Amino acid sequence: MLPVGPIRSKLVAGENEMIDARTELYGVIGNPVHHSLSPAIHNRAFKQLGWNAVYLAFEVKDLEEAMKGIRGLGVKGVSVTIPFKTEIVPLLDKVEGLARKIGAVNTIVNQGGKLIGYNTDSDGALRALEGKMNLRGRKIVLLGAGGAARAIGFGLKEKDCHLIIVNRSKKRGESLSRGLGCDYLPLSSLDKMKAEELEADVIINATSLGMYPRGGETPIPKGLLKKGMTVMDVVYQPLWTRLLREAKERGCVTVNGLEMLVRQAAAQFEIWTGRRLEVGQIKKDLLRTLRGEPTKPRSVGLKEGKG
Ligand code: NDP
C-alpha cells in the first residue's frame, strides 16, 4: 500500500484547534452512514497529529452529484462504504491495481484534482488474520461474494491460499469463484455437510449474516467448526457474533470484525497522511465508543509511516 504524500496544512503549535479557512476536508460517503465509526477514528487521529483537518459523514443519495462535490470542493480524501464501493470505480480518474482486480474501492485520494481509488478492506482483513497465523498456502472457506468477500478473496489469492467460495446466490458465488479460479459451494449445502467433509484451516464470514439487529443468525452450523480452526467474522455489530461465540465454544481461534475495521482505517489514514496509526489504541477507543463511554481526548497512538 503506497502512501501518496503528506497532507499540506498543519496547525501551528499553540494555535487554537478549531476549524478555519485552511482546514482540509475528509469524509465517508455511503447510505446509510449514521452508524459509521470512521469519523471517530479519523478525527481522533487528526487531532492527535495536530493536523488541521476534519472528517465528516455524508449520507449520499446521488453518487455522481457527490463526486462533482468532492472534485468541486477539493475534498482531500474519502472513505467509501455500502452501497457505493463498486459503483464508484468508473467515476474515478485512476484505480490502483488490487482495487481494480477486486472491482471495488473503499478509499479515494484527491491528488491535485485527480481522484485515485484504493481498496484497504483487503489489507485490513489480511493483517487481522496475520495477527494470528501465517496465511500462505492455507485452506480457506470464504462465506460471501459481495464487496467484502471480493476484497478478502483477491487478497488471499495473492497469498497462494486454497479457497472455496460459499454463497447464498449461485450467480454471485460462481462469478467470484471464477474470478479467483476456485470452487463454489451453495450456502445451503453446509446444512447437510458432515464435519469431516469440511477441510479448512480458516473460515471467514464475509456475509452480513449475524449483523445487528439479526444477531441470532449464523452462516455455518456449529457442528462444522473444529478445534484448531481459525474463524473470522467481518461483522462487528455485535462484536461477538453468534458465529464467533460458537467458534470459541468449539475451541477455534477467533478474529472479530473490529480487528479488520481498525486495520482498514489505519491503511486509509496512511494513504492520506503517510502516518501509521497504532491499531491497539484505536481499538480501545472504539470499544469505548461502542459501549457509549467517553474517550480520552488525545488517546490515538501514531507512529511515523514508512513513506
Ligand atoms: P454486500 O451487500 O456486497 O454482500 C453481502 C453478502 O452477504 C453477500 O454474499 C450476500 O449473499 C450475503 N447475505 C446477505 N444477507 C444474507 C442472508 N440473509 N443469507 C445469506 N447470505 C446473505 O455487502 P459487503 O460485502 O460490503 O458487506 C458484508 C458485511 O461485511 C457487512 O456486514 C459489512 O458491515 C461487513 N464489513 C465489515 C468490514 C470491516 O472492516 N469489519 C468492512 C466491510 C464490510 P448474496 O450474494 O446471496 O446476496
Image (tube, rainbow, N blue to C red):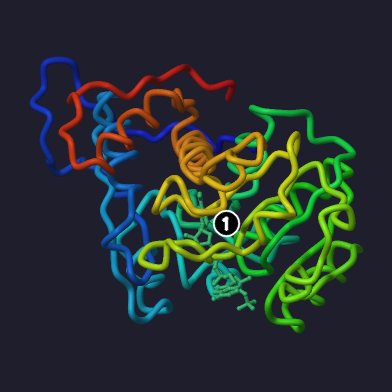
148 to 20, vertically: above or below: below
Callout 1: SS: strand
Report the number of numbered marks.
1
Taking the image in four quarters, ligand 1 sits in the one at bottom right
Quarter of the image with the N terminus is top right
* Residue that label 1 marks: 117
Residue 168 placement: quadrant: bottom right
Residue 34 placement: quadrant: bottom left
Quarter of the image with the C terminus is top right
At horizontal 83% and vertical 41% (from top left) the residue drawn is: 159
At horizontal 90% and vertical 39% (from top left) the residue drawn is: 137
Residue 218 placement: quadrant: bottom right
Name the spot of residue 80 as percent of width and height, x first: 46, 60
131 to 250, vertically: above or below: above
In the image, what residue type sits under mark 1? Answer: Gly
Q: Is residue 305 left or right of residue 138?
A: left
Q: Nearer the viewer, residue 235 or 4?
A: 235
Q: Nearer the viewer, residue 31 or 198?
A: 198
Q: Nearer the viewer, residue 51 or 139?
A: 139
Name the spot of residue 62 as percent of width and height, x first: 37, 81
Q: Is residue 111 left or right of residue 247?
A: left
